[in-house]
Image (cartoon, rainbow, N blue to C red):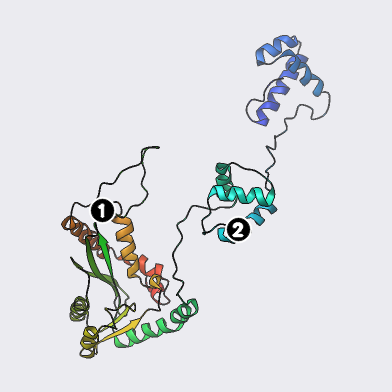
Amino acid sequence: MSRPIGTPVELERRRQQAVQAVAGGPARQTVATVLGVHVKTVSRWVRAARTPGGVAAKVHPGPTPGLTDDDLKRLAELLLQGAKAHGWHNQLWTVARVARLIEHEFHIRYHPEHVREILKRRLGWTSQKPRRKARERNDKEVARWVGDEFPRIVRDAFRRTAHLVFLDESGFFLTPTVRRTLAPRGKTPVLTGWDRRDRLSAIRAITVSPVVARPNLFFEVFDHTVHAEQVVAFLADLHRRLGPLTVVWDRGAIHDKSGCVRAWLAGHPGVVTEKFPGYAPDLNPDEGVWGWTKYGRLSNLAANDTDELWDHVIDELGTAKSSPNLLKAFIREARLPSLSMAAK
C-alpha cells in the first residue's frame, strides 16, 4: 500500500489523475510506474472511483488526546490548589510531580517532557519564580493603606506643594548575585568571584514633583552600613534642593524610630514623614530601582574589589536617574492609586 504524500488535497488530486489516466487507455502498470506507486494501488483507486467520493482523501484526526478538555479543566483546578495540598512538603510544581499527579488522578502515564508540553500548549502555564510574602503581612491593613491612607498622603503633599519622596536603603555585595544565562548545552558557565561579605550600601529616593508629577532619582553610596546620621544628611540635601517634602518610607530603625532623625525632623517642619504598612516592600517604587540594579544590571558581576563594584553601582544608578520612563515604570509597578495614573 502506498504512503500518503503531501496534503489530503494533493493526495486526492493524485488519485483522480491515476483514474483518468487508466480511463484514457494506458495500462495500469504504466500509470503506476509514472506515479511511483504499486499497480495494486492504482487498481484500488480505480475500484474506489466507482463509488461517489471514493477517491476523496480523509484527513487523519491524529491520536486522541489522553486528557480531554474536561480533564484539563480538572487538572488546572488541582494544580491551583498547590503542591502541598497533594502531599509534597513545598509549593513547587515540577513536570515530574505533575506527571505523578496525572497518573494518580486520571490513570494516564506521561513522560515528564510530554507533561511540559501539556502545561505550555494546552494550559498556558509557564515557568515562573514566585514572589515572597511575609507571613506577618496583614493584607487587609495593606488594602486599607492603599485605598485610604495613600490618597490622603497625596492630597496633603499636593496641598503643601511638596515633593513625594519614596526612600529606601539596600546593600550590594562583592559576592555575585547569580542569575541564569545562556550557554552551550552541557557547558555550565563558572563565575569566579570572592566568597566574602564585603559590601557597599546605598540610600536612594524616587521623588515625584508636585503638580506635574515628574519623577527623579537621588542616591548616595557608602562603603559601610547606612546609619541614621547618613539618613539625616540625605534628607537635608533633598530638602535644600527640592523644598517641602513628604517622605514615605518603611518602619526601619534608622527612620522614624531613630532619635537622631526625630530631632532633625522636629526642626524642619517642611519635611513630613509617612510610613508604609508593615512587610509591604512592593508598595515602594524605590524597590524597583534596587531589583533592576541588583538582579538585572549587576547580576553575575564578579567584581575584583569594592572599588570596581562601586563604579558599577554608581553607573547603573546614574542610568536609572537619567531614564524618566524607567522611573515611571517602577512607579506603575507599585500600583499606588493616583501616583500610577500620573506615571503613564
Nearer to me, 127 or 197: 197
Q: In the rendered view of the protein, which quadrant contains the C terminus?
A: bottom left
Q: Which amino acid, by three-letter code, is at mark 1?
A: Asp
Q: Which residue corresponds to the image point at 51% horizontal and 56% vertical from the top-left?
A: 92
Compared across the picture, whether 53 is left or right of 308 comes to: right
Q: Report whether 77 appears left or right of 235.
A: right
Residue designated by label 1: 195
Q: Quadrant of the N terminus?
A: top right
Left or right: 327 as drawn, with respect to 53: left
If you read the primary sequence from the N terminus, does the residue marked by circle 2 or circle 1 appear first? 2
Position above or below: 341 against 298:
below
Q: Which residue is mark 2?
A: 86
Q: Element type at marker 2?
A: helix
Percent x, y of residue 238: 21, 78
Q: Dot 2, how many residues are within 10 Å of its Cα: few (below 14), some (14-19), or many (20+)? A: few
Q: For the residues marked 2 and 1, what is the alpha-carbon distance in whole angstroms? A: 39 Å
Q: How many marks?
A: 2
> Helix, strand or loop at disc 1?
loop
Q: Nearer the viewer, residue 199 or 42?
A: 199
Question: What residue is shown at x 28% (from left), y 55% (from top)?
Answer: 298
- Quadrant position of residue 190: top left
**The residue under label 2 is which amino acid type?**
His
Quarter occupied by residue 184: top left
The residue lying toward the viewer, choosing from 131 and 341, is 131
- Residue 302 horizontal/vertical position (percent): 24, 51
Residue shown at 64%/43% (left/top)? 109
**Residue that sits furthest to the right in the current view:** 51
Viewer can see residue 289: yes
Return the x and y of residue 27 as percentages of the image width and height.
75, 9
